[in-house]
Structure formats: C-alpha cells, structure tokens
Amino acid sequence: ADEPAPVGNYEQRKMEEERRLRGFEEKLLVLVQELSPPQKREGGRAGRRSYHSGQNTAQTNSLAYKDYILTVCHNVMCLPFQMGEVLAILSKNEDGWWLAQDSKGSKGLVPKTYLKVPSVEQFFDVDCCHSNYIKNIWFYVFCVCMFQRYSDQEEDDEEASEDEDSNWDCVMRAITEIDATDVLSAMGAIPAGFRSSTLSKLLDEGITYRASHYIQPELSQSKLSFKDLFRDPDTGKVRQRTARTSLTLTLWSCKSIPTPGVGVQVLSRHIRLCAFDGTQVLSNIHTIRATCNANNVKTWSFSPRMTGNLPSLLDGDCFLRCNSDAPELGILFELGVTYIRNSTGERGDLSCGWAFLKLFDTNGAPVPHRTYELLVHGGTPYEKDVEVDPSLTRGATGTGMFQQMMLSRKLPKLFLKLKSPNVRTRSQLSALPDTLVGSLSSIHLLVLHRQLLADILLMDRATMQNADLICSPLLATFPEIMDQSDLLDALRVNSVAGSRLRDLPLLKKKFVRVYMDNIYPLLYSADLPPPRWADEMVENQRARVIFNSSLEPFHTHTPDSPPRHQAFDISQLTYDLLCMAQ
C-alpha cells in the first residue's frame, strides 16, 4: 500500500520530456554562439577542446551526434554540407567556426577543421566560379572528412586533455604546411620537386632529434649504470669508445639549386644532415647555413672561416659519429630554405631536394674518403625518381656523350669531401657519445662537458644507486646552449686560449669558470631575446648582448645598471639524472 501507483503512458511522457530538454539545449547553444565575442588565441584553443568533446560524443553515439547537428543546422546557426562541396567563406572567427555560404545561397557556421584550400585547377573550375562567387572574390575551400580519431574511452584528467590538444595542433600544423606547399607549387612560385621540409618537422617535434638530447649519457637496461659513459681510474679521463662510423667531412658547395619565384622571400639557405638508414633518422639533425652571391643565387657555398654573427652555422667542417649496424647506413643531406610569403607574411621551411651518401658498400666495407659529387633529388627522402625541377630535363633529346654532359651540368648537385680524422681529432671523437653529429669547431667543448659528466656522475655521487638532484648549473644548462649556436660560439671564443692546456684539472677549472662567468648569466638574462631561426633582427640583437657582455665577466655590472634576469627556477641549478639521461 505504501508503494506509489504506476504511472500511465510512462514511455510517451519520457520521450516528451526528453524532446523538451533537447529543445532547451539547442536554444542555449544558439544563444552562446550569438552572444560570445570573438575569441583570442587562448580562446581558440578552448574552442578546439569543446569541439574535440563533440567528436568524442560522435564516437560513442554516432546517430545522436548526426541528429543533433542536423537539428541545430536547420534551426539557426550551422550550415550542413557534404564532402567535396565548395563553400564561400564570408568571415573567419578565431574560435574555429567560420561563416560560409554554399552554392544555394544558404549561410551558416562551419568548422574550419573540415575545410581545406583547393588546388588551382579546382579553384578555376567553371562549375565553381559562378557569378555570385566571383563578384565578391570569396575564398574557396573544400569540405573534407576529419581523419583524426579519438579513443572511445573519455579521460577526465587534465593531462589527457592537454595531450589531445597537442596532437590536434600537430595535425593542424601538418595540414597547413602541406596546403601552403601545394599552393606555392600550383602558383609556380616553387619548382615541382620542392616539398615541406622533412627534417625541419622532426626538429619542431621536441628535443628527440637535437644535439642536446644526444650529448646526455645513455642508461643501461637495468637503469642502474651507464651504457656509454665510463671513467678510466688510472688517468681520470673518459674512457674512449670506438664506433662503427667516426669521420669528418667538409661541405664545399651546391650548384644549380633552383630558387623560389616571385612572391616568396628567402630568409635562409641551409643544409641539414643526419645519419640515415633509408627508413629512419638515427642521429641528431645538424644544420649548416649556406651563403650565396647576389649575382648567382643558385650556387651555395660553405666557409670554415669563422665570420658573422653566427659563425658556427657557416662552418662546413663537421664530424659524424654513429654506432648503428644498419647495412644501408649513410648520411642524409636535405637542402632547405626558410621563406616568408610577401602577400600573407606566412613563414615556412621548404626542402629544395636531398642527397644521400652511403657509407658502406655491399660487402660492408667503408667507402673511400675522397671528394663526392652527389646528385640532388626532389621530393622527400621517402620518394624515388622525383626531379627537383622537371623543366631542366623537359625537351632534352639525344643520347650522345655531349648531350649527356650538357644535361649533367644543369642538374643540381652537392659537393663534399669525406676525411679521416687526425690523431688528435680521433682521440676527441672517441670520448664523445656513440652517436652524434656536430660542428668540428666545437668538439673540444663537447669533450670537456663529457669529462665533467663522468667526474660528477661516476665519481662524486655517494653510490651508483643514488638518483638525487645534483647541484651543477653547468650540467643542468649546457644542453640548452647546444641549441643556441651563438652562445656556444661565445663559449668557444672565451675558452679557446686554454683549449690546448695539457693539465686536465686546470683545463676543467678554466672551462667551468668561463661558463659560469660569461655564458650562464646570459642564458637567463632578460636582455637576451629568445632565439628565432632565420630572423636577422633577433640574431643581431642577441649578438649585441652576447658579445658585448662576454668581453668581461657578467658580475662586473655597476649598481646603476644591474643585469636583469628571468624568474628563478630550480632546474637552472640542478641536474636531474633520471630526466636528462637517455
């Protein structure tokens, strides 16, 4: 008798209540879209996060997601469309929702993540260019399906949300770069064999392919000792280790390299090189900047003489050390340019071609050390038989020797020389990590850093199982200057006077003193702008601060003009073995 009476037509009333609540939800969303101001950059990120949430809902309940979208679109704001449909973009909101109009004249909001820029042929398609599109000079885009998928299980913690946003940013960045390259190629601004830089993308992913990662000691499988760092108890020096490949090379020049056309300004010409086995990068990526004459921009040259604001970038003398046993081991050279579009101000990195020098023959014997003339291929290292500029060979006829010689002179080529290191350089290379690529002018600094690592990690620790933070500002911050060549040059210039001292303890003391007096304060100085690749203004500003301050110890500033420093962080003083080691 105490139980409530059963409710009649329960299912019908439940469905009516559900429809009423959905109606309220749709009206609230419409009000939010109408009343919300244009989002700033931070807001745009938040907008993407809410959009990701919608995608997760689609994965779990696809039918509800489609019905919800269609209902909202037909009511007020959104514009439904299909894959392959052409839309005109009327305005762009920074929250990721753009106002668009379809060919029928219907207007509404569309997510920009479903759109991409059409090719030139599609852009000038007669069916697309009807009058109301042309007279307003609208921006055409194609609708494409989303290709990133998310996990079916939703994670509520903040770390998972940040990871999703990070992945989404990488996808959006890749789409933008590919579209920019396609547009420039279709416009004729760059040759057909140019691509978005492969090695530049790897450098942007983090420290995995940077020298700052490879100079760190590698832990053994047990995580209780080091795999590649040992100290000789008799001499106190780092124990030398042999590697399968340990050589030096000199880049001479590049010839007949095509240049971007009108509307693209070149900010930097450079070569990026690394150890490569045909499928993956096996070392850090080292960058060397090229110079060219204004009267002959198709010829790049590299000088070992230290001149300019960033001299180590111009140094064509390099070393390569790699212990991989891959049969196809070689050196990958990617010729690249950093550009800026005059019309939009967009910056990017293009690959002007690539060359590969195999270091071992079919029998496993090293190739001879001599001068090599390598043909530069177009596309990416994973593409075959792609020409940098097909117009160079178009229309070429004849198979005679003279015709082949004339054609060969037009093709882009890279000239370099492999060299055997001398006794002193070979000894220095043996003290370095098993895998590393870098400038030959800084090799003595890397050896001293390696020696200090061995002293502190193998001798000064109480026990080998001790993983506490180590108070060593030099070890904690030296990897940072490996990615800032101007600071590395300042350290080399100030410590070159004692580089040939034979007294190792005295040499280490001088190295530490020069680093702490001249480089360490600069690294966290508020007067030093953060580095930016191929920005001449920033490079000049950094050069003035670095080389004016490095002439005398940083602590000699007067009380009237004290140095300004960034906010203090414990990572500036302590070396975290578990986080820094490979």
Image (spheres, rainbow, N blue to C red):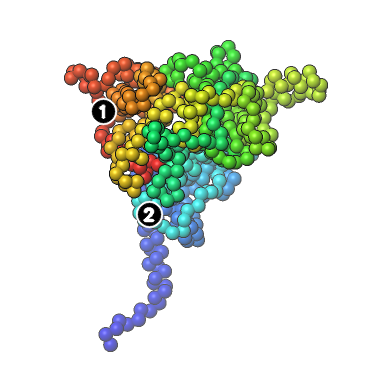
The spot of residue 364 in percent (x, y) is 65, 37
The image quarter containing residue 277 is: top right
- Asked if residue 522 lies left or right of residue 57, the reply is left
Amino acid type, callout 2 = Lys
The residue located at (30%, 35%) in the rendering is 472
Among the 4 quarters of the image, the one containing residue 197: top right
- Residue 195 on image: x %, y %: 58, 32
Q: Which residue is mark 2?
A: 27
Instruction: Identify the residue at image location x=27%, y=21%.
Output: 554
Of residues 277 and 140, the one nearer the viewer is 277
Mark 1 or mark 2: which comes first in sequence? 2
| Dot 1 and dot 2 residues touching (CB under 8 Å) | no
User: 76 above or below 569?
Assistant: below
Residue corresponding to mark 1: 565
Q: Secondary structure at mark 2?
A: helix
Q: Does the image show residue 500? A: yes
Count residues near mark 1 (Cα–Cα under 10 Å), then give few for <14, some for 14-19, many for 20+.
some
Circle 2 residues within 10 Å: few <14, some 14–19, many ≥20? few
Q: Measure the C-alpha gap from mark 1 to mark 2.
A: 52 Å
Decide which of 135, 479 is in the foreground and name it: 479
Task: Name the residue located 49 percent from the left edge and 43 percent from the top edge.
Answer: 171
For the residue pair 567 and 213, the one nearer the viewer reads as: 213
Residue in front for this viewpoint, 15 or 65: 65
Q: Above or below — where is 243 with respect to 153? A: above
Q: Residue at x 67, y 35 (%)?
A: 361
Q: Is residue 342 left or right of residue 566?
A: right
The three-letter amino acid code for the residue at tag 1 is His
